[in-house]
């Protein structure tokens, strides 16, 4: 029987974490399942909630909020060090709800496709629309340019201009992609050993793209699999601290470009991309400040 470890990072969202864990408990998986919650120094009683209501969960309490990568890595290190580690590891956001059969569906997909190193489901937002981040191309200099300067929004059906979020594709079609999203990303444990842990230079955002980039460098495929659906109450955590979240979002864009593309990109293009990121960041910060607190979001 295949085995799976689910890793959920939490920061001050006990309400969402409870719903996520309850959805997992409501329909036990057929695979051998363990669930790990990393609490990033929450002050809202999240850790107490897990201990009292979900005693079957492996709880790791971090004394600091080290960000998404550092928090998840606390669990990944412990999982990899187990005498009998699981076959698969799923990174799962606390603001998701997992329908019955979803975990087994992703496990079965990897069992049946040995060349695939990571898989992600169709993620649906509360209004029923597709979370566009669940299937993406890498933000190469060309792709990033089209996105930063609005061409992807103007031409959402164009394979060329809308490559990043792949909006030209039917969301019900299984597709090999560059990256799925860390909100629900299942990876083979052997792949994690090969490529290493999440890069902790990414505090929040971008770490999933970076991980996917490294996974593909090792020759593994990554697949968007709409045969499984998971529900995502997106940005629920980041909306609590909008300014730091916006800065982290655009810093992640800079970091990814500098890490993977800047050295092989002409200097003028690098400057244009950095300029575009800065303009988008300033626009997002300014627009966010003009909104009422309940409407403030990242991006």
Image: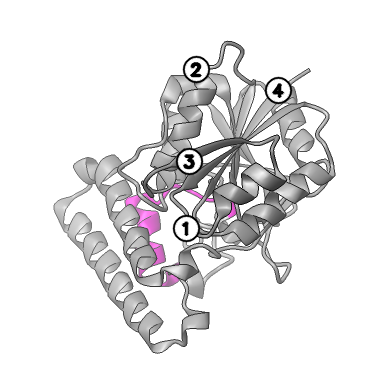
What residue did someone put label 1 on?
Answer: 43
Image spot of residue 206 (x, y percent) = 41, 49
Disc 2 to disc 4, C-alpha distance: 15 Å
Measured in 3D between alpha carbons, the distance from the residue under mark 1 to the one under mark 3, in whole angstroms, is 11 Å
Which mark sits nearer the N-terminus, 1 or 3?
Answer: 1
Kindly report the distance in space between the C-alpha atoms of the residues bearing marks 2 and 1. Answer: 29 Å
Find numbered disc 4 in the image and state the secondary structure of the residue it sits on: strand
The mark tally for this picture is 4
Residue 271's image quarter?
bottom left
Location of the N terminus by quadrant is top right
Q: Tell me whether the residue at label 2 lies in contact with that at label 4, contact meaning CB atoms closer than 8 angstroms.
A: no
User: Which stretch appears magenta?
Assistant: 134-152
Label 3 near label 1: C-beta < 8 Å? no
Task: Give the x, y percent position of residue 84.
Answer: 61, 12
In the foreground, 290 or 217: 290
Q: Is residue 68 left or right of residue 234?
A: left
CA–CA distance between discs 2 and 3? 18 Å
Residue 26: in magenta span: no
Secondary structure category for the residue under label 1: loop
Residue bearing the label numbered 3: 61
User: Pointer 4: what residue?
Assistant: 3
Tell me whether the residue at label 2 lies in contact with that at label 1, contact meaning CB atoms closer than 8 angstroms. no
């Amino acid at each position: 029987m295949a085995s799976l470890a689910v890793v959920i990072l939490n920061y001050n969202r006990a309400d969402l974490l409870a719903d996520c864990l309850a959805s997992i408990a409501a329909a036990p998986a057929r695979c051998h399942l363990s669930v790990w919650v990393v609490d990033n120094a929450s002050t809202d009683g999240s850790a107490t909630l897990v201990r009292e209501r979900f005693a079957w969960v492996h709880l790791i309490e971090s004394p600091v909020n080290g960000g998404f990568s550092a928090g998840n890595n606390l669990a990944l290190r412990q999982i990899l060090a187990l005498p009998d580690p699981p076959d698969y590891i799923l990174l799962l956001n606390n603001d998701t709800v997992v329908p019955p059969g979803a975990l087994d569906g992703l496990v079965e997909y990897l069992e049946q496709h040995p060349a695939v190193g990571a898989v992600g489901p169709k993620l649906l937002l509360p209004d029923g629309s597709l979370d566009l981040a669940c299937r993406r191309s890498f933000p190469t200099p060309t792709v990033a340019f089209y996105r930063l300067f609005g061409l992807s929004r103007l031409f959402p059906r164009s394979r060329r201009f809308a490559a990043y979020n792949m909006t030209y594709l039917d969301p019900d079609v299984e597709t090999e992609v560059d990256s799925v999203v860390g909100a629900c990303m299942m990876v083979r444990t052997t792949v994690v050993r090969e490529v290493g842990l999440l890069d902790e230079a990414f505090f929040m955002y971008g770490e999933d793209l970076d991980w996917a980039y490294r996974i593909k460098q090792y020759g593994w495929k990554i697949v968007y699999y709409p045969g499984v659906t998971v529900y995502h109450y997106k940005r629920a955590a980041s909306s609590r601290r909008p300014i730091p979240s916006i800065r982290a979002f655009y810093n992640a864009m800079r970091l990814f470009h500098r890490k993977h593309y800047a050295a092989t990109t002409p200097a003028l293009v690098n400057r244009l991309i950095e300029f575009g990121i800065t303009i988008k960041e300033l626009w997002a910060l300014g627009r966010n400040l003009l909104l009422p607190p309940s409407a403030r979001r990242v991006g």
